[in-house]
């Protein structure tokens, strides 16, 4: 299994990779200004890294309901399925961007935001959550 974690955004798309070892690692975010260029780069990454599963952050509201942003993610998920014919797993992304941002010093956040670092760290948290749910727990040694 080779998973690509995705934190979807209209300006930046955070990415992370994980595999059977169960560890998610952030990748450089897609920050191309044109959506077509971001999509082409995503296709290239999926092909080059031989991705088998796509793990997409799903934006539930704090009360568990689905809002307008979820409709954008639903459309993106449909496009992913149609284009790449890979399983797309939706994972609750509640507070992942907040958690990712909190790992960066406040004075640096504005500068870092445009780089996509926060988005890829959020993708890493989304993917790690998915991998943790899929991987069997370690058997303690006696």
Image (spheres, rainbow, N blue to C red):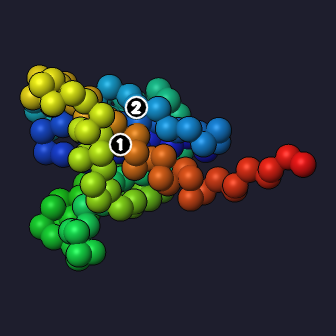
Q: Nearer the viewer, residue 2 or 82?
A: 2
Tags 1 and 2 touching, CB below 8 Å = yes
Taking depth in this image into account, of 37 and 137 the one nearest to the observer is 137
- Count of numbered circles on the image: 2
Q: Could you classify mark 2 by the number of other residues whose Cα lies within 10 Å: few (under 14), some (14-19), or many (20 or more)? A: many
Report the residue at 29% width, 59% height from top: 94
Residue 43 % position (x, y): 35, 35
In the picture, which quadrant includes the N terminus?
top right
Gap between marks 1 and 2 measured at Cα: 7 Å
- State whether residue 94 is above or below residue 142: below
Mark 2 falls on what kind of element?
strand
Q: Residue 40: x percent and y percent?
A: 27, 32
Does residue 9 appear in this view?
yes
Q: Label 1: state its secondary structure.
A: helix
Residue 67 spot, x, y in % from top left: 16, 70
Q: Residue at x 27, y 75 (%)?
A: 64
Among numbered discs 1 and 2, the one appearing first in the sequence: 2
Q: Kindly identify which numbered label has been placed on residue 26.
A: 2
Q: Is residue 127 above or below residue 62?
A: above
131 left or right of 5 in image: right
Q: Is residue 86 above or below residue 22?
A: below
Q: In the image, is 129 to the left or to the right of 20?
A: left
Res 36 visible: no
Q: Which residue is mark 1?
A: 123
């Amino acid at each position: 299994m080779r998973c690509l974690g995705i934190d979807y955004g209209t300006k930046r798309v955070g990415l992370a990779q994980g595999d059977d070892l169960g560890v998610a690692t952030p990748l450089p975010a897609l920050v191309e200004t044109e959506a077509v260029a971001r999509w082409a780069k995503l296709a290239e990454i999926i092909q080059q890294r031989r991705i088998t599963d796509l793990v997409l952050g799903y934006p539930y509201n704090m009360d568990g309901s689905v809002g307008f942003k979820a409709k954008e993610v639903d459309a993106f998920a449909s496009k992913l399925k149609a284009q790449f014919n890979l399983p797309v797993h939706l994972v609750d992304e509640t507070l992942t961007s907040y958690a990712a941002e909190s790992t960066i010093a406040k004075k640096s956040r504005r500068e870092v935001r445009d780089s996509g670092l926060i988005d890829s760290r959020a993708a890493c948290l989304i993917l790690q959550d998915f991998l943790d749910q899929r991987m069997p727990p370690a058997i303690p040694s006696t």
